[in-house]
Amino acid sequence: MRQLELAYIKVYWNEGSCSTVNSTTDGMLGGGWAGSFDTDPADFGITSVWETPLMLSNSWGGYNQGVTPRPRHICPNSPVTFTRYALVSRAQIGLAIQNFQLPALSIGDVYRLRMK
C-alpha cells in the first residue's frame, strides 16, 4: 500500500511519423524521476488505481526562435526504461563556487522559455 519507490524513467520521444522511426536508435532522449525514499507508514484506503504523475524532460520541441513549440510523443515499441534506486546512506557536503551567478531568466519582458 505504498507509492512507487524512487525510480528514474528514460524514454525516447519522437517528433515525426512513427512509421519511419527506428525505435531503438531514433528519437530525443527524455527522462524524469518518480517516487521517493519516504518511509512513512503505508497509506490505507480503498482505491482501484494508484496515480503517479511523471514529469519527463524534452517532451516539447521547437523552442528555437520563431518556431511554435509542439509536443513530442512516444512511438509504439520505443524503449521505456525504469531504474529503481535503493537508499544506502545519507550525506551532506558544503560547496562554495567563487564568482558564480545564475543566468538571467528573462530579457526585458520576454522569458527565455516563452514565445512572445
Image: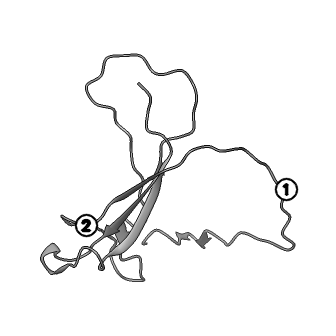
Q: Residues within 10 Å of mark 2 (few under 14, many from 20)?
A: some
Q: Quadrant of residue 101?
A: bottom right
**Residue count near mark 1 (Cα–Cα under 10 Å), binned few <14, some 14–19, many ≥20:** few
Is the residue 102 above or below the residue 94 in the image? Answer: below
Check disc 2 and report the residue beneath it.
78
Residue at the image point whose x is 66% and y is 71% from the top: 104
In percent of the image, x 37 and y 16: which residue is there?
A: 45
Of badges 1 and 2, the one in the foreground is 2
- Disc 1 and disc 2 in contact, CB within 8 angstroms: no
Q: Which mark is residue 62?
A: none
**The N terminus lies in quadrant:** top left
Q: Is residue 98 found left or right of 67 in the rendered image?
A: right
Q: Give the SS element for disc 2.
A: loop
In this picture, is 60 found above or below 49? below
Amino acid at circle 1: Gly
The kind of residue tagged 2 is Ser
Which numbered disc, 1 or 2, marks the residue that appears first in the sequence?
A: 2
On-image quarter of the C terminus = bottom left
Where residue 112 appears, x then y in whole percent?
Answer: 53, 72
Q: Which residue is mark 1?
A: 94
At numbered mark 1, what does the secondary structure look like: helix, strand or loop?
Answer: loop
Above or below, 44 against 101 in this view is above
Q: Position of residue 48 (x, y in %)?
A: 25, 25
